[in-house]
């Protein structure tokens, strides 16, 4: 009973073993299709500075959103260290990714985790996580609109430059003939 917690059962151990087997099988098929040489080449490709840059670029948003959770919990009167809020955010993201229906299924257990760890009321923790998720979605949409606008302007500008070059070449070709 102590090894798997209160709800530990043979069923949960079987489920974990099944998912581990499926994951390893998918990895095996991937290596078989791509080839071990291709996988090795891809893993050796990035330089150390590129790897560090990617790690920082991946970790920075996690820290920012964890700090946002810290601020939201502080607004409800919960006092906990920033590093713990970041860890709770990471745990809630994990729960959102492994439960059915994403945030709809992951936020209630995440709220219970946050409430249990921080001493907050479950309703306050759920409200903080819901607010954080809403702000995250708005930010993602705004970043997407900005990116699409920038990319679209580059494509339109490139098309105009290309059109001007083609027109100039046609006019230049006409004058030489």
Image (spheres, grey):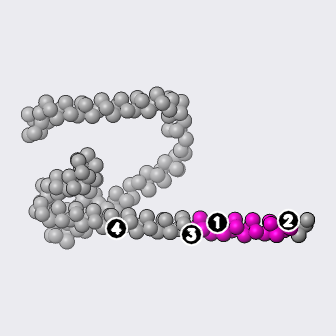
Name the N-terminal-most of marks 1 and 4.
4
- Quadrant of the rendering where the N terminus is positioned: top left
Residue 177, image x and y in percent?
Answer: 91, 65
Q: Main secondary structure of the magenta part?
A: helix
Q: Mark 3 points at which residue?
A: 153
Res 158 label: 1
Residue 172, image x and y in percent?
Answer: 84, 68
Between the residue at mark 1 and the residue at mark 2, the CA separation in whole angstroms equals 22 Å
Numbered range of the magenta stretch: 153-174
Of badges 1 and 2, the one in the foreground is: 2
The answer to whether the residue labelled 1 contacts the one labelled 4, judged by CB atoms less than 8 Å apart, is no
Q: Is residue 62 left or right of residue 47?
A: left
Name the N-terminal-most of marks 3 and 1.
3
Q: Quadrant of residue 128?
A: bottom left
Q: Residue at x 64, y 66 (%)?
A: 159
Between the residue at mark 2 and the residue at mark 3, the CA separation in whole angstroms equals 30 Å
Residue 160, image x and y in percent?
Answer: 66, 69
Q: What element carries label 2?
A: helix
Q: Name the residue under label 4.
A: 138
């Amino acid at each position: 009973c102590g090894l798997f917690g209160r709800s530990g059962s043979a069923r949960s151990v079987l489920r974990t073993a099944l998912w581990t087997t499926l994951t390893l099988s998918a990895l095996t098929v991937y290596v078989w299709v791509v080839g071990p040489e291709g996988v090795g080449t891809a893993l050796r490709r990035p330089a150390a500075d590129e790897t560090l840059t990617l790690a920082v670029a991946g970790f920075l948003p996690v820290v920012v959103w964890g700090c946002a959770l810290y601020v939201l919990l502080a607004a409800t009167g919960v006092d906990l260290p920033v590093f713990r809020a970041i860890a709770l955010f990471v745990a809630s993201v994990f729960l959102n990714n492994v439960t059915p229906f994403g945030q709809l299924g992951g936020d209630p257990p995440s709220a219970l985790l946050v409430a249990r760890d921080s001493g907050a009321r479950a309703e306050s923790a759920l409200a903080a996580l819901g607010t954080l998720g809403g702000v995250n979605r708005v930010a993602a949409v705004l970043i997407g609109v900005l990116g699409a606008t920038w990319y679209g302007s580059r494509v339109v500008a490139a098309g105009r430059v290309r059109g001007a070059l083609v027109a100039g070449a046609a006019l230049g070709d006409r004058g030489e003939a």
